[in-house]
Amino acid sequence: MKKISVESFFQQAKERLRLTPLSDEGMANRYIVSVDINRMGMALTGYLKWFAYERLQILGKTEVHFLQTLEPAQRKKILKTLLSHRLPCIVVTHKMKPPADLVSEARKQHIPLFTTPTPTTKFVSEISVYLEEEFAPETTIHGTLLDVYGVGILILGHSGIGKSECALDLVERGHRLVADDLVYIKRLANRILMGSRSEIIKHHMEIRGLGIINIESLFGVGAIRDKKRIELVIRLEEWDNKKEYDRLGLTPATHKIFDTEIPMFVIPVRPGRNLAVIIEVAAMNNRLMKLGYFTAQEFADRVGRMMTEEQTRQNSLKPKGKN
Amino acid sequence: MKVTEKMAIINKLGLHLRAAAELVKVANKFKSHIMIHHGIQNINAKSLMGIMTLAAAKGTEIEFVADGEDAKDAIAALRQLLANKFGEKE
């Protein structure tokens, strides 16, 4: 199971979540192990039966005020018990100033303690989004990801089939490259698949015969993107005379990544077939479908309507009574 | 046929660009589908850029999985390439 050290959490999120450390002891060997968070609430009253200590702990306005109402001796005792659990870290929200004995106890027990000016509810939603992203399942896939007319298209196919050449063609036509050869995929909330590139490769590409080229310096920042949601898969295959390819597009196939099914088109490759144009059209067709216009279905309906009309016309031409 | 083998990078510079190119060249001689597993990464051994993302330094262990009729030969050739330090001196 994935775990994030509090130190790397703090380094990455301090600006986004507006965190200031009050005690940074023990940051390197405390870990966040879950996307869930816990508001300390009831635990402060001494009820520890369901104390989810392994989660990131949040102290809001209510909790801090409650701690202030306690007798100093009792407060010390409760804090000592709570902080002896293996907590990852504590965040005090809403610009609240935590009681001095909380800060000293946190330092003593090596529990990182942060404050943030963000109000509790907002902070909870912000940190949940952040942790969801961090803990999202991740994988890599051999393929090429582009943004074509705003549609994230993942091109798959065997090595040497021409994915990179096809991508180059699309970039030349004004579309944007996200990643070539190796695509990092994260599954975010609502089963969204977000594709991005490797920090090492960035926007370099290998074109057989040319070697390594840099799309950003050749085509400019307008030709690249850092990440894009994957909405359509194009699988390139060698043309096989015996295979039946989809001729209608009435029932698009799908490609499964994690448990998300993405519409997929299998495009046979043959010299002289302009793949870039086919992919552009696939992207535009996908947008049409999103707008509620299903070309193949509309066409089928239209043919059906015309056949009925023709039938009616012929029937009306027949002499009456002789049916 | 599927053959899996873990191998270590033993040359001084690790899997740098030229070494990766050699690896891709060897992998491409075989019909088998060859993958490299390292951490969360699954990389096609026939793709140069993919291999570069491994940034595998000296001492790194990577796992090769070859799948196809010549999988055994492919793994043997890769083993030899890595043992020969990609034809480099050190």
Image (tube, rainbow, N blue to C red):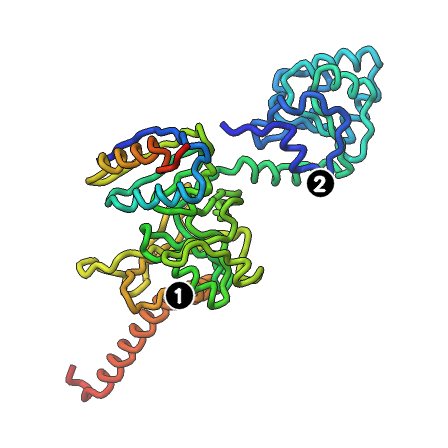
Badge 2 element: loop
Q: Residue placed at 82% from the left, 10% from the top?
A: A73
Residue B36 — which label? none
Q: Is residue A285 left or right of residue B29?
A: right
Q: Earlier in the sequence, mark 2 or mark 1?
A: 2
Residue A259 visible in the picture: no
Q: Residues within 10 Å of mark 2 (few under 14, many from 20)?
A: few
Q: Residue placed at 22% from the left, 82% from the top?
A: A315
Residue A257 location, x and y as percent? Answer: 40, 44
The answer for which chain carries disc 2 is A
Residue nearer the viewer, A128 or A199: A199
Please, what is the three-letter code of the amino acid marked with disc 1?
Answer: Ala
Image position of B11 with respect to A315: above or below: above
Residue B3 location, x and y as percent? Answer: 26, 32
Question: Same chain, marks 2 and 1?
Answer: yes
Q: Residue placed at 25% from the left, 34% from the top?
A: B2
Residue at the spot of label 2: A15
| Quadrant in the picture for residue B86 | top left
Residue A41 location, x and y as percent? Answer: 71, 24
Q: Residues within 10 Å of mark 1 (few under 14, many from 20)?
A: some
Image position of A219 with respect to A117: above or below: below
Residue B75 location, x and y as percent? Answer: 27, 34
| Quadrant in the picture for residue A245 | bottom left
Please, what is the three-letter code of the amino acid marked with disc 2?
Answer: Glu
Residue nearer the viewer, A162 or A101: A162
Badge 1 element: helix
Residue A2 visible in the picture: yes
Residue at the spot of label 1: A276
Q: Residue placed at 63% from the left, 32% from the top?
A: A8
The answer for which chain carries disc 1 is A
